[in-house]
């Protein structure tokens, strides 16, 4: 008789954004006349930039001609894209990476879920609380998270680092030493950031205790303040202790196009074993390469026109963030984020729980957000709104919330 991976049975409910999707669909079906504004999942609304579309058209045409047709992409990514990333995302920030330290994939969600596979089953993970649920769920599926403690809404074998208003949403070093530390900056969901000095302390800490940092920098393009680092490799010693995850979803609108990359420096070793080689082995075995057309589209993000056009899109979303933030503050809500990140993190009013506020907002304002509790126990009492909507919908959503 076959056996299943019983770790799956421990997972509570469905994935956060699936639960929200189901709730919203049910509401929509029951109230077909209502116009619902979605500021829940961080999904972009602006079309791909013209320079990207042009590159995709060109690549599509190449696929229709025998001489320029492409079959399987190289499993670790085309050299043209890996080099463009090293040049534009890193060299410009004073970070020197070799192109084969960069691995192309079809999304940061899968990378952040898959990266745990190269680590031992008995590693202890530490996560910020609240946190992007994929880090914890993927470790739970691998049996690394222990048991789910329903009454406390957390996992027995995970170190949670509370990020709340009192500590300015910045984690403190845990009492127990972790082996793997997940950090996401600019942060999803709180929209907070660490300065370079603060991040350096995490790098020093990881080096001291022999831990690895999985650094999710998917929202890097939204940084507006000078002292906020764009990559963990701006910190001394980070190449020996950190893996960085990046995405084209939020900086160039690829949520439906799918493209991302992971940086695993060759300096990063466990004893004599290179993590770069392990990830190459894993990626090469389980992934057949992101499509040629999409990688050409990714390359176009780094063209002069691509850079200018995506910068404009980011400014558009950050203007939405300002509308949300200032609108909520003027209506007397407490909120943060939205300055270096496309997320605004608000305190729920009147002591409502996150899910209670979700229901109130959906029923009374027909606005969808994300309950903070879905990101971890310390997200309870908070609520996330995304700046990725259209400007018109964002303005309307805030007007509706103000009237509530
Ligand atoms: C979010 O809303 O947190 C993200 O869009 C989800 C994701 O990137 O997978």
Image (tube, helix red, strand yellow):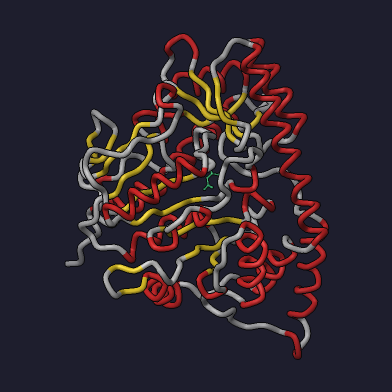
Q: How many marks?
A: 0
Q: Nearer the viewer, residue 286 or 112?
A: 112
Q: Residue furthest left?
A: 1
Tell me if residue 205 comes above or below residue 77 in the rendering: above
In the figure, is residue 223 to the left or right of 273? right
Q: Is residue 219 visible?
A: yes
Q: Quadrant of the C terminus?
A: top right
Instruction: Name the quadrant containing residue 294.
Output: bottom right
Q: Going by the image, does 14 lie left or right of 309?
A: left
Is 237 in front, or is 63?
Answer: 237
Residue furthest to the bottom in view is: 67
- Could you say where residue 12 lies in the image, as x and y percent from the top left? 31, 40
Left or right placement of residue 206 versus residue 248 in this view: left
Q: Residue at x 66, y 44 (%)?
A: 44
> Is the residue 83 above or below the residue 214 in the image?
below
Q: Is residue 29 visible?
A: no
Identify the residue at horizontal 38%, vertical 59% (top origin): 241
* 231, above or below 322, in the image: below
Please say if 317 is above or below 281: above
Measuring from the top left, give residue 358's x and y in whole percent. 50, 23
Q: Residue at x 59, y 79 (%)?
A: 73
Rendered location of residue 363, percent (x, y): 56, 19
Q: Quadrant of the N terminus?
A: bottom left
Q: Quadrant of residue 373?
A: top left
Q: Position of residue 196 (x, y in %)?
A: 51, 44
């Amino acid at each position: 008789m076959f056996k299943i991976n019983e770790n799956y049975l421990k997972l509570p409910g469905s994935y956060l954004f699936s639960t929200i999707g189901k709730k919203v669909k049910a509401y929509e079906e029951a109230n077909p006349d209502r116009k619902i504004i979605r500021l829940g999942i961080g999904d972009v609304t602006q079309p791909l930039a013209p320079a990207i579309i042009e590159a995709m058209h060109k690549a599509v045409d190449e696929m229709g001609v025998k001489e320029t047709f492409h079959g399987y992409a190289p499993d670790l990514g085309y050299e043209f894209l890996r080099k463009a990333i090293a040049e534009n995302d890193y060299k410009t920030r004073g970070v020197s990476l070799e192109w084969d330290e960069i691995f192309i994939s079809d999304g940061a969600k899968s990378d952040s879920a898959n990266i745990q596979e190269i680590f031992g089953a008995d590693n202890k993970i530490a996560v910020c609380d609240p946190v992007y649920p994929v880090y914890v769920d993927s470790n739970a599926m691998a049996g690394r998270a222990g048991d789910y403690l329903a009454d406390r809404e957390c996992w027995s074998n995970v170190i949670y680092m509370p990020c709340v208003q009192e500590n300015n949403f910045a984690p403190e070093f845990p009492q127990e030493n972790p082996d793997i530390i997940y950090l996401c900056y600019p942060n999803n969901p709180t929209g907070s950031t660490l300065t370079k000095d603060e991040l350096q302390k995490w790098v020093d800490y990881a080096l001291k205790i022999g831990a690895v940092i999985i650094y999710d920098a998917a929202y890097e393009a939204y940084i507006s303040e000078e002292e906020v680092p764009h990559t963990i490799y701006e910190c001394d010693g980070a190449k020996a202790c950190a893996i960085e995850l990046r995405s084209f979803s939020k900086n160039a609108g690829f949520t439906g196009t799918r493209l991302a990359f992971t940086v695993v420096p060759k300096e990063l070793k466990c004893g004599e074993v290179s993590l770069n080689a392990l990830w190459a082995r894993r990626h090469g075995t389980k992934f057949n390469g992101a499509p040629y057309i999409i990688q050409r589209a990714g390359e176009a993000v780094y063209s002069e026109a691509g850079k200018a056009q995506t910068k404009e899109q980011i400014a558009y979303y950050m203007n939405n963030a300002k509308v949300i933030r200032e609108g909520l503050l003027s209506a007397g809500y407490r909120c943060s984020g939205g300055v270096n990140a496309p997320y605004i993190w608000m305190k729920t009013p009147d002591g409502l729980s996150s899910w209670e506020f979700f229901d109130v907002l959906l029923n009374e304002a027909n606005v969808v957000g994300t309950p903070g509790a879905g990101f971890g126990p310390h997200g309870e009492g908070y609520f996330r709104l995304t700046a990725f909507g259209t400007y018109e919908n964002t303005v309307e959503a805030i007007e509706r919330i103000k009237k509530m």
